[in-house]
Amino acid sequence: MKNKVTKAIFPVAGMGTRFLPATKSVPKEIMTLVDRPLVQYAIDEARAAGIEDFIFVTARGKSALEDYFDHAPQLEQELERSGKTELLEAIRATTMDSGTIAYIRQQKAMGLGHAVWCARRLIGDEPFAVMLPDDVIAAETPCLKQMVDAHAETGGNMVAAMEVAPEQTKSYGILDVSAQDGAVVKVRGMIEKPEPAEAPSTLAVIGRYILTPATMRQLGQIAPGKGGELQLTDAIAAEIAETGDVHGFRFRGTRFDCGSKAGFLQATVAFGLARADLGPEFSTYLHELIAARAAAE
Ligand code: G1P
């Protein structure tokens, strides 16, 4: 079996109900963080980690996503004619080479585990990454690259992990770990969205995974779990029981939950402030706004 991770699955079939009415016509993944759609951040992170094949698990109503990755010859011609080279470069950087991107339809919303399983025929007998574009991670070394490097040492399955507040365990897959030290932790168990009283720890899974073909096979066997859905967490938990070959990886970086409105706003502010072209003016504006609000109170 090949050990290098060159394929990534992007589950993007979700309806994005938390962002209605915007998501009535725009897929959530196309929503804009400063000036790039969410999905572009995930793609750039994947590329930086050496991913060569990009597999999108989509659903009805997601055609804007496919168009986004297409060539835009008219737009390119126009930008070239008017000498807007920087924009031309930005547009060209979004185009994917022919054959590197594949779309699979998830016909029924049966959960994240099922979405990943839909891509099984494109994966074959090699390890693969899963990236959830809702989780945007700002990091000096992109998160998936950190994981691919750590995975070269450990092999097996690896999930990104981060501490959360005890009352938040019910929003995440939660890890049961034997030793808490270091970036790489051995995982003994994994539970999808436990209530705080049932949570084995406060170490939560964030949407970056490196998984084995055996875990993909587990996805074809698991029963519906939390919320009546086929859960990726349950397939990984089954692999722990069978092989014990699952590691948590505490990444270095800041994660934004762009699946929630508050998280999306926080990411917008943080990424806006971090931009050389926008940051200084935006920072002045925010300071003035906050001072004016404080004065009015
Ligand atoms: C999914 C997973 C969950 C994980 C989370 C990370 O949940 O099921 O285990 O912790 O992503 O963002 P979702 O947020 O899609 O409900």
Image (tube, rainbow, N blue to C red):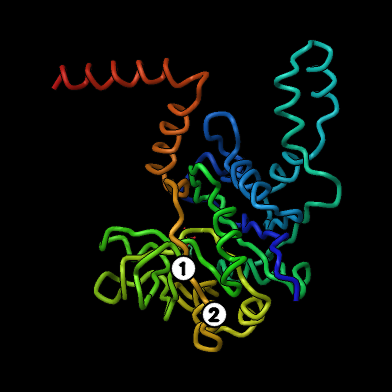
Q: Residue at x 37, y 42 (%)?
A: 262
Front position in the image: 143 or 168: 143
Q: Look at label 2 and name its amino acid.
A: Asp
Question: Measured along the vertical axis of the image, is residue 243 above or below residue 114?
Answer: below
Residue 45's x, y, as percent?
Answer: 61, 47
Residue 128 position within the rendered picture, expressed as x and y whole percent measured from the top left: 67, 66
Q: Quadrant of residue 210?
A: bottom right
Residue at the image position 79 percent from the left and 23 percent from the top: 75
Of the 4 image quadrants, the one containing the C terminus is top left
Q: Quadrant of the N terminus?
A: bottom right
Q: Secondary structure at mark 1?
A: strand
Residue at the far front: name it. Answer: 153
Work out whether 229 lies above or below 207: below
Residue denoted by label 1: 248
At which x and y percent is residue 247? 49, 72
Which is more toward the observer, 174 or 184? 184
217 displayed left or right of 277: right
Quarter residue 281 falls in:
top left
The residue at label 1 has a CB less than 8 Å from ligand 1: no
Residue 69 marker:
none
Q: How far apart are labels 1 and 2 at the CA level? A: 10 Å
Q: Which residue is mark 2?
A: 245
